[in-house]
Image (cartoon, rainbow, N blue to C red):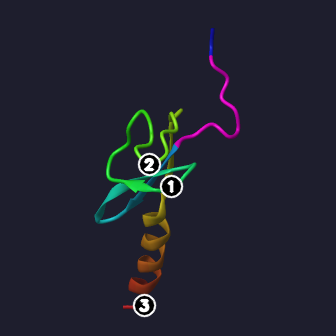
Amino acid sequence: MTKIKKKNDPYWIHHTHSPKKGEYECSVCCRRYSESAPSCPGCGSVMTGVKERSEWVDEAEKWDMYLENF
């Protein structure tokens, strides 16, 4: 039997920010960790997956605009 993911199922939010190593944030308790795990060490929620969130893309676009002026 296949498990159907619900909208509120817990998941990791993977924050990547160049040049730093990424962090994983729990979607339930919002605590951040350097690695993902099957469950959150803070609140105990069992994770169903990872959602990517790339802040570095916005930062790279800002640097491109800045450097074009030189």
Crowdedness of circle 1 by 10 Å Cα count: few (<14), some, many (20+)?
some
Disc 1 marks which residue? 53
User: Helix, strand or loop at disc 3?
Assistant: loop
Name the one closer to the observer, 58 or 34.
34
Residues in magenta, as a range: 3-11
Crowdedness of circle 2 by 10 Å Cα count: few (<14), some, many (20+)?
few
Query: CA–CA distance between discs 3 and 2?
Result: 46 Å
Sequence-first disc among 1 and 3 = 1
Above or below — where is 16 with respect to 52? below
Sequence-first disc among 1 and 2 = 2
The quarter in which the N terminus is drawn is top right
Which residue is rendered at x = 29% and y = 65% of the image?
19
Query: CA–CA distance between discs 1 and 2?
Result: 21 Å
In the rendered image, residue 21, in percent from the top left (x then y), is placed at: 29, 58
The image quadrant that residue 68 belongs to is bottom left
Which residue is rendered at x = 70% and y = 38% of the image?
7
Name the one closer to the observer, 52 or 48.
48
Disc 3 marks which residue? 69
In the rendered image, residue 43, in percent from the top left (x then y), is placed at: 49, 45
In the rendered image, residue 15, in percent from the top left (x then y), is placed at: 44, 57
Disc 2 marks which residue? 42
Above or below — where is 17 with respect to 45? below
